[in-house]
Image (cartoon, rainbow, N blue to C red):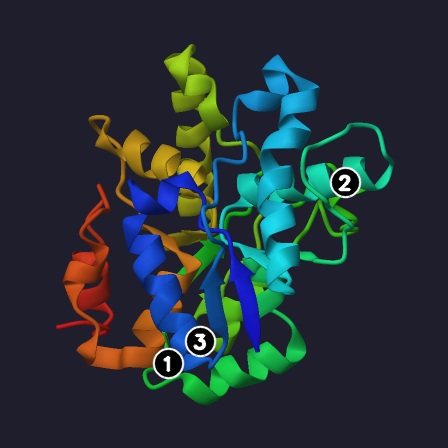
Amino acid sequence: MNLAFYPGCSLEGMANDYARSIIAVFEKLDVGLVEIDDWTCCGATAAHSLSDAMSVVLPAKNLAAAEKMGLDIVSPCANCFNRLTYSRKMLSKNIYDVPWNVTGKSKVHDMTRFLAQPDMISQIKDNVLMPLKGLNLVSYYGCQMVRPPRITGFTDYENPRTMDHIAEALGANALDWSYKATCCGASIGLGRRDIQLTLSARLIQKARQTGAEAIIVSCPLCQANLDMVQTEKGSQKVPIFYFTELMRLAFEGKACSIKNFRMHLTDPGPLLRKKALID
């Protein structure tokens, strides 16, 4: 099976750890990721606040490229998934004209939802070399992956479970909590750092109160917000993992190097060593 891979801008910079773990995981699962040729920014997170037309036009180029490849798209970033899905839906209604032919035949998959399909969960379990036993975590989905339901089509926007199912397949203990789809502040930190810090710090606090030792995410912006807030003095440190990083860890076992987490601000080493998951 091959998929058109839309990495998005973050995976070439601050989310490089995420990019490398995705490549390693999909190779293990024997799913080919064919990077969309000459892909461009989808406009997240600012385009839709400036021009609704541009929020449709910018992702459309990538949709058209995937259709030429004859493949469905998979997006690892929640925000990119949201913008690609929105563009596809608006184009199907003929609301905007774009300079590319987009028929809508290529589906857009959120990566967590693709990997949480029953057949993929079965493959994930088959590839686990080192179960993540004893690791208590919560899944944080944020607000862009599942909302708005009129665009995503998802009915589980209050209680998504895709990453929970993946974590459980890896042998981890996925704890339930009430903040999995609560906003972390997204990009508001550019103008109101105080608001972003308050929202992100509350999520760290609630995760701790739930008994979580780590948080897993799929969105680079969510990861950055939750990771950076812990540089504030007095905060309790909770590693923020991309969900594919833990998949890679479970697939590779002790062969997985701590260097694979080098972009993290909150060092996950102490927790992983405490759980005997890494040397």
Mark 3 secondary-structure assignment: loop
Q: Residues within 10 Å of mark 3 (few under 14, many from 20)?
A: many
Q: Residues within 10 Å of mark 1 (few under 14, many from 20)?
A: many
Residue farthest left in this picture: 279
Residue 139 percent across, percent down from the top left: 50, 54
Task: Give the amino acid at mark 1.
Answer: Pro
Count of all numbered marks drawn on residues in the image: 3
Q: Which residue is mark 1?
A: 131
Can residue 179 be seen from the camera position used here? no
Q: Which mark is residue 100?
A: none
Q: Which residue is mark 3?
A: 170
Rounded to the nearest whole Å, what is the CA distance between mark 1 and mark 2?
Answer: 36 Å
Tell me which numbered mark, 3 or 1, is placed earlier along the sequence.
1
* Quadrant in which the C terminus is drawn: bottom left
Q: Residue at x 32, y 45 (%)?
A: 12
Q: Is the C-beta separation of discs 3 and 1 under 8 Å?
A: yes
Task: Give the amino acid at mark 3.
Answer: Leu
Q: Residue at x 26, y 80 (%)?
A: 253
Q: Is the C-beta separation of discs 1 and 2 under 8 Å?
A: no
